[in-house]
C-alpha cells in the first residue's frame, strides 16, 4: 500500500542539495511507551511510533536535500535505576542511512525513564556546523523525569541557531502534561495511531513544501498601497529574529513575493512610527500566503519660517512626537523635515524656547500636516562676571522659568540662546554676591530673525 507520506513527493522545498534540511527524531522509549493507546486497542504506543517512522524513512529516500537521524532516550537502563543520562544517537544525520534507521527502530524496546531535556541538550551536538534547516521532532508520552528544563534548552538551541524549530508529538498526554510542552515549540497531542500518522504528514508538509507569502500594508481605503518600510519576522514561540525585509511594491503595484519558512509561526513587526505588531502568524505550506495589516500613514512636516542667524542653534530644535492624550514618545523629529507616521492623533512638543505645544494633531493620508514655526531671535548675554540667572516669561500673572544660565564663565563670557518671538525677563545676581538683595532684572523683547545683546553687570 502506498505510504501517506509519498503523496508529498512532488512538492519538496527546493532541489538544491546545498540547502540541507536535517530532521532529527527524538524518540521516547521509556517504559510507559510499551503501554497501549487505550483499552480499545492492543497496539502499543512504541509500536505505532516504530511503524510510522519506518514508513517515513521509506518516503524520504527520494529527497536529495533531506537528512534524517534518530536519537532515542529511556531505552538503555531500567526505570528503577532512574538514569537521567539515558540517551543515545542511534543513527547520525545522513541521506543514505534509511535502511540503518529502520533496522535500529526495529530493535528498540521500551525500558527506562524520560530525560527529555538531557536528550535535547545532547542533540545539539548531533547537527553539523554547516548551514541548513535543523529540525527536532520529539515523540513522548510523558513529562520530564529528571531535573532538566526542556523549555530552556529549546529556547537556547533556537537562539544559537543550532535548531530552526522543535515539534513535540505527545502520545495520549494528560492535560497538565500537554500544557508542559507548549513552551518547547509546536506541539500536538495524539490519541491513536491514525491521528499520529496524520500529524506526522502535516509536519512533513510544513518542513518540505515550497511556500511563498506577501505582506499587504493597507491604506485607509484597505488597499495594499503602503510600502518602503522594514519588516522583521520573529519566531512566535521564542521571539528570535528570522527574517528582515524592506517592503516594496513590484512593477504591477503589488507587494513583492517573499519566502517564509512554514516550519515556524511568526510575530511580525512592521517598523512604521510607531511600529505595528501582528502575532502568531501561521504560514500554510504549499500555497501563497497573504498577510494583511492596517498601516495607513500620513506625513508630519515641521518647518521654520526662515533661518536663525546661528544655524547651529537652529539644528538643536527637535519635535517630540507622542501618541495622543499624553501617550508614549514615539519619535524625535528634526526641524525642517517631513516624517511619515501611522494615521492617528498625536501630541507635539517642539523644543523651542519656550516650548511649543500642539495637542491632538490628526495625521491622515489625505495631505501632510504642516507645522510652521516663526524664526526665533537670538539673545546674546554678555557676562562680565560669573552669575546665577534664569530667563522667565509671564504666564497667567505668574513667572515661569524657561532657561537657566550657565554660571561658569571659563569657556566663554557670552552665552547665546535662540528664543521664540515674545517678551521676557532675565533675573540674575553675581555668583560672588553675599546677599540676595543684589539680584537684578532686565525685561527684553525678542523679534523674529533678529539679534540682541544684553550685558549682565552690577547696577
Image (cartoon, rainbow, N blue to C red):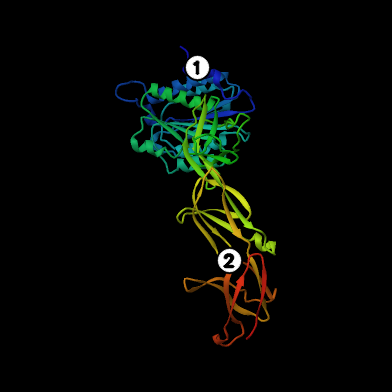
Res 26 visible: yes
Q: Position of residue 78 (x, y in %)?
A: 41, 33
Q: Tell me: residue 361, above or below residue 114.
A: below
What residue sits right under mark 2 in the picture? 353
> Mark 1 Cα within 10 Å, few/some/many (few <14, many 20+)?
few
Please count the marks in the image: 2
Q: Does residue 64 sit above or below 448 in this rendering?
A: above
Residue at the (31%, 25%) spot, across then down: 38
Q: Which residue is mark 1?
A: 7
Residue at 39% of width from left, 24% of height from top? 195
Which of the pair 192/448 is nearer the observer?
448
Mark carried by residue 203: none
Of mark 2 and mark 1, the one earlier in the sequence is: 1
Question: Residue placed at 67% from the left, 67% from the top?
Answer: 450
Instruction: Pinpoint residue 241: horizontal percent, then vertical percent.
Output: 55, 41
Camera-side mark, 2 or 1: 2
Callout 1 secondary element:
helix
Amino acid at each position: 500500500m502506498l505510504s501517506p507520506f509519498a503523496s508529498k513527493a512532488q512538492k519538496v522545498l527546493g532541489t538544491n542539495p546545498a540547502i540541507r534540511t536535517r530532521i532529527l527524531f527524538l524518540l521516547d522509549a521509556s517504559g510507559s511507551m510499551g503501554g497501549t493507546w487505550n483499552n480499545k486497542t492492543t497496539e502499543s504506543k512504541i509500536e505505532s511510533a516504530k511503524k510510522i517512522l519506518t514508513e517515513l524513512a521509506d518516503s524520504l529516500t527520494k529527497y536529495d536535500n533531506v537528512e534524517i537521524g534518530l536519537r532515542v532516550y529511556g531505552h538503555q537502563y531500567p526505570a528503577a535505576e532512574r538514569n537521567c543520562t539515558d540517551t543515545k544517537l542511534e543513527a547520525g544525520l545522513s541521506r543514505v542511512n534509511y535502511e540503518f534507521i529502520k533496522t535500529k527502530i526495529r530493535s528498540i524496546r521500551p525500558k527506562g525513564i524520560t530525560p527529555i531535556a538531557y536528550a535535547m541538550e545532547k542533540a545539539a551536538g548531533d547537527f553539523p556546523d554547516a548551514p541548513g534547516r535543523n529540525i527536532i521532532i520529539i515523540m513522548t508520552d510523558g513529562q520530564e523525569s529528571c531535573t532538566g528544563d526542556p523549555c530552556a534548552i529549546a529556547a537556547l538551541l533556537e537562539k544559537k541557531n543550532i535548531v530552526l524549530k522543535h515539534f513535540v508529538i505527545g502520545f495520549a498526554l494528560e492535560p497538565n502534561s500537554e500544557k508542559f510542552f507548549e513552551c518547547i515549540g509546536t506541539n500536538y497531542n495524539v490519541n491513536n495511531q491514525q491521528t499520529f500518522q496524520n500529524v506526522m504528514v502535516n509536519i512533513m508538509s510544513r518542513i518540505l513544501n515550497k511556500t511563498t507569502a506577501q505582506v499587504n500594508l493597507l491604506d485607509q481605503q484597505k488597499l495594499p498601497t503602503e510600502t518602503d518600510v522594514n519588516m522583521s519576522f520573529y519566531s512566535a514561540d521564542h521571539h528570535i529574529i528570522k527574517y528582515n525585509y524592506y517592503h516594496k511594491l513590484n512593477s504591477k503595484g503589488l507587494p513583492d513575493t517573499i519566502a517564509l519558512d512554514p516550519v515556524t509561526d511568526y510575530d511580525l513587526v512592521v517598523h512604521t512610527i510607531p511600529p505595528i505588531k501582528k502575532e502568531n502568524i501561521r504560514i500554510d505550506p504549499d500555497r501563497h500566503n497573504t498577510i494583511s495589516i492596517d498601516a495607513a500613514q500620513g506625513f508630519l512636516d515641521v518647518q521654520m519660517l526662515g533661518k536663525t542667524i546661528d544655524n547651529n542653534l537652529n539644528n538643536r530644535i527637535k519635535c517630540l512626537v507622542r501618541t495622543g492624550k499624553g501617550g508614549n514618545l514615539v519619535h524625535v523629529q528634526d526641524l525642517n523635515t517631513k516624517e511619515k507616521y501611522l494615521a492617528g492623533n498625536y501630541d507635539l512638543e517642539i523644543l523651542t524656547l519656550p516650548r511649543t505645544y500642539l495637542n491632538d494633531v490628526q495625521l491622515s493620508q489625505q495631505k501632510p500636516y504642516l507645522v510652521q514655526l516663526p524664526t526665533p531671535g537670538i539673545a546674546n548675554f554678555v557676562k562680565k562676571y560669573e552669575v546665577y540667572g534664569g530667563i522667565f516669561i509671564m504666564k497667567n500673572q505668574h513667572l515661569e522659568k524657561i532657561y537657566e544660565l550657565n554660571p561658569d564663565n571659563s569657556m566663554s563670557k557670552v552665552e547665546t540662546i535662540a528664543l521664540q518671538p515674545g517678551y521676557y525677563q532675565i533675573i540674575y545676581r553675581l555668583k560672588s554676591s553675599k546677599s540676595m538683595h543684589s539680584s537684578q532684572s532686565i525685561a527684553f523683547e525678542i523679534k523674529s530673525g533678529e539679534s540682541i545683546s544684553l550685558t549682565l553687570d552690577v547696577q
